[in-house]
Image (spheres, rainbow, N blue to C red):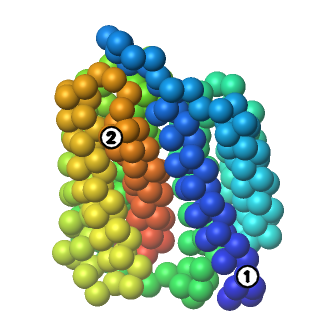
Amino acid sequence: MKNPWLHRSAILVAIVSLMVIAWGALLTSETRTFPGATVASAVSAPSLEQVHRIAGFVVAFLMCFVANWTLRSNLIRSMAGITAIVEIASGRAPIVHALFAPLFFSFAVAIAVLSSKSWEAGPKHVECSWKPLRPLGIAVPILVVLQIGLGTAFRHNAMGVVWHILDALIVLAIAMVAGVCVLRQYEEHDSLRPAALALLIIVGVQVLLGFSVYLVLLMSSENNTGLIVTGMLHVVNGSLTLAASVVLAMQMNRNLIQLSGA
């Protein structure tokens, strides 16, 4: 590795960005008002929201710096910069801001992977005997982004929860198929197996957290502590789900070789 500190910096940016996402989710949960609620939601101090925006700006600047010094691809560096700019500029557009935050975190995780020693060592090619496997790997992060968008719209009272639940079933099914296939076929692979296992674990946790949020909503329409905590954890793990799906797609695209005629 040319400079291990760049890789460590990328990991630090990813960790801090996830903390900022958790903070934003907590602020959103505290100020949210549910239809039919009889008790007004608590409003966080404006200073906390201002600190959240400043923290997001600092993290965005750091990611652009690390991406510029770490990545060779101008396209990826440009995409990382655009994501950071949109995330900063959308502070007064809550739905856009909440949607781009997981994308920002995923870029930070991708930069950490691209700057790692194992990535620089080169791919370990294996044959892909099932043609739909790679397209499934690419489809998972796309569906997760859609799922995050539906969840964001629900959290900001822009739509109901039905579509979010239905899409969750689709995401779960496709992620399970892709992850299990990778685990069964490439159980000795140093990169594919950990990426698939991480995705399956995180998706499983996300489903449990989603059920927890829904159960709390069924018990009470008021904005209580249980709903705030489970909602925040669901948002944070949603960002982890997107990042894990992106990493798996990267590893599949890098290491799997399609057999001719397969």
Where residue 37 sits in the image (x, y, percent)? 35, 15
- Image side of residue 36 versus residue 26, left or right: left
Q: Residue at x 69, y 31 (%)?
A: 46
Please name the residue that numbered disc 1 is placed on: 5
Q: Residue at x 32, y 77 (%)?
A: 193
- Image side of residue 233 versus residue 10, left or right: left
First reached walking from the N terminus: tag 2 or tag 1: 1
Q: Quadrant of the C terminus?
A: bottom left
| Residue 79 appears anywhere in the view | yes
Q: Which amino acid does label 1 sit on?
A: Trp
Decide: marks 2, 1 in contact (CB < 8 A)? no
Please name the residue that numbered disc 2 is placed on: 226
| Residue 133 appears anywhere in the view | no
In the image, residue 109 sits, relative to residue 8, either above or below, namely above
Q: Which residue is at the front of the view, 251 or 6? A: 6
- Picture quadrant of residue 197: bottom left
- Picture quadrant of residue 133: bottom left
- Picture quadrant of residue 10: bottom right
Task: Check disc 2: other Cα within 10 Å, few if <14, some if 14-19, many if 20+.
Answer: few
CA separation, marks 2 and 1? 39 Å
